[in-house]
Amino acid sequence: MYREEFIGEFRIVEYEGYRLSGEGYAVVAVPDAGLVGVIGAGQLIKSMKLKEVGGIDSYIHLPPVAVISRGEIRLPIRIFYGEDLLLIYSEFIPSTPSIPQLARAIINYVERKGANFLILMSGLPVPNRFDLEKLRTYYIATTDYVASKVKDLDVVPFENGYLVGPYAMLLKESVNYRLNTLVLLTESYLEFPDPEASARNLEIFSKVTGKSIDVKELLEQAEVIRIRARDTMKNVVRNLAQMRKEYEYAVPLNI
Amino acid sequence: MSEFDEEFKRFLRRMRELERRTREYIEDEIRRVAEEIRSEIESVERMLSPSWSHNGYLRPLYSIRDEGSNYVLYIDLPRVDEGTIDVKFLGNKVLIRARLKEETRFSEWSGRGGEVRFNEYREVIELPFTIEPSKVKVITKKRVVKVIIPKE
């Protein structure tokens, strides 16, 4: 272990020293609709050959889990790094009351590691996902700089509506830290793993950052991923129901 | 019949009506609570049991939605051979069986099911109503099955 720190009730461990260079991109992937963010992040780690440099744990807010990866003992929330990209990845979701504290700890940490541009990629659950052939991607930009990055891309602004869950808290917290934040939300299933939506988010990510990501491989592996992600998805759906994810279907009464 | 008798009869009628409504309300509430408990137990059971079996089959993810005049059941069957999807209805149960396109195993997963080879999906879904098989429509798209069950 290289370094250890505590932010609130979360313990952040680094296995080696690192700092973001260049633009300083940060991606946070946590389980949400269709596991879109987590599946996309998995491909990003593979495609960019990111190195695992740390992890986050909590004795109070996270399930008592040890992740064993290639014989190494890892923490439930994992930190990956490669030059100008920091990626925080979790297949576990903390209890609903713990999410604000976790979001605060993550945003505080990535900002101190030199992140300037935060990209959050998730699914936007739509009831007619079964019938959709072409998936639409919506975006939320917290600054004019971020908006200019997606200006000419095939994305639609998410202007009115609700976001519920961990990404909502990460977005709000990133505004407090004045980070350039881009949220990409692609139409997806809520209750089934949706690698197709992940691939669509990665295509946009690739154009925004100029990084080449192998989306073809993800699409080829889509069905295997759907099989492997079933148990994680099953557990996540229950958590999403507890945090009243269905509010996202609500039409705001007044804007 | 005196005015008092008439009034007493009306009073009795009102009491019987009140008793009937109270009984119906209590019965409805008991049914609702029983359904909630059943669904909660089912959900906990599903959470604690793995979605695969050592006997070589996988249990698919599914969801049920109320879409106005129909109940719609969605079943996720990745890697399935679509020609082998068999959906049967028996009372209030939906029986699903389908073969995978090719044998699947999670070789890099140590212990547990890591060495098991999976060949098919199997699941029995219990619904809170009886299904009329002749009225049901089944559509498959990208290895997701949509079962449309009319309410009437």
Image (tube, coloured by chain):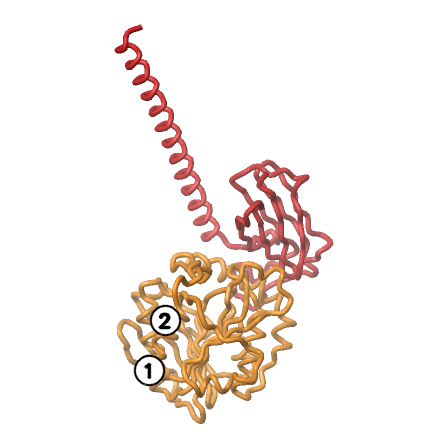
SS at mark 2 in the image: helix
Q: Is residue A222 above or below residue B34?
A: below
Q: Please say whether residue A53 is visible from this viewpoint.
A: no
Relative placement, left or right, of B93 versus B46 is: right
Nearest the eye: A141 or B114: A141
Query: Label 1, on which residue?
Result: A177
Q: Are marks 2 and 1 in contact (CB under 8 Å)?
A: no
Neighbour tally class for label 1: few under 14, some 14-19, many 20 plus, Cα within 10 Å = few
Task: State how far apart marks 2 and 1 are (Cα).
Answer: 13 Å
Q: The disc labelled 2 sits on which kind of residue?
A: Met
Q: Chain in orange?
A: A
Q: Is residue A94 above or below residue A78?
A: above
Chain B is which colour?
A: red
Give the numbered dot on residue B76: none
At which x and y percent is residue A214? 61, 80
Query: Label 2, on which residue?
Result: A169
